[in-house]
Amino acid sequence: MATALEPQIEEVLERLWVARERGGSTSAGSAAASLDFDPSAALAEAQRRGWISRHNGAVDLTAAGESRAAAVMRRHRLAERLLCDVIQVDTDSMEAAACELEHSHILSEEATDRVCAFLGHPPVCPHNRPIPRGRCCDTLTRDVRPLVTPLSECAIGADFRIVFVASRSHRRLDRLAAFGVIPGARVHLHQRQPTFMIRIGGTDIAIEAGIAADVFVVPA
């Protein structure tokens, strides 16, 4: 059962994971480093749950703690990838927002797997630190396509639904919106060369390859 201590416990597990990952000490002191709360209660609760063991000042993750900490790190680092690659927030905002997503549990295990698939099962976070693998990674091969793909990589003759348009050009976004190329619209791709030809709402539209690469879709 989740308690008010849950975010603090997860923060402590994360610190222990990162300290070990970096080859540093895993002590109560390292777990408390730069935290804005006293971790004593969180450490005690984590030990009661069987997630950590303590001996002579050292704090170690148990097998159950490893599993729990891996889930926390996976959620955090996938949130960073989502914020960096898709929403394109700045580094400082990314870290704070990823922490909020991590501890709010908006990203359930199923939702985390969907984000992972959406991003193409990235192996590392934006800081180049490994992202623990999940069930979705273990059941799919490395060359499985992400759930959301650029229109430029899609098969001719198929129908898709637009998820987002990634262009940073407001002029291009306005021009595409005028043709109905907006999130939620259904699009049929029927030509790739010499230009991409798509059909939206009964209207055929020619777009350049660079524009097609900015339109991300899922199968309709």
Image (cartoon, rainbow, N blue to C red):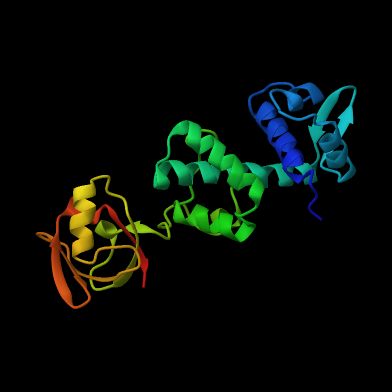
Of residue 4 and residue 149, the one placed in the foreground of this image is 4
**Residue lying furthest left in this view?**
194
Q: Quadrant of residue 195?
A: bottom left
- Quadrant containing the N terminus is bottom right
In the rendered structure, the answer to whether residue 59 lies left or right of residue 218 reads right
Q: Residue at x 31, y 69 (%)?
A: 185
> Where 215 sits versus 61, above or below?
below
Q: Residue at x 54, y 33 (%)?
A: 129
> Where 220 sits versus 177, above or below?
below
Q: Residue at x 60, y 60 (%)?
A: 110
Tally of marks: 0
- Quadrant containing the C terminus is bottom left
Residue 86: horizontal and vertical position, in percent? 40, 47
In the rendered structure, the answer to whether residue 27 lies left or right of residue 178 reads right
Residue 130: horizontal and vertical position, in percent? 55, 37
In the rendered structure, the answer to whether residue 159 lies left or right of residue 19 reads left
Q: Quadrant of residue 219?
A: bottom left
Residue 40: horizontal and vertical position, in percent? 85, 31
Res 129 seen here: yes
Q: Residue at x 23, y 67 (%)?
A: 180
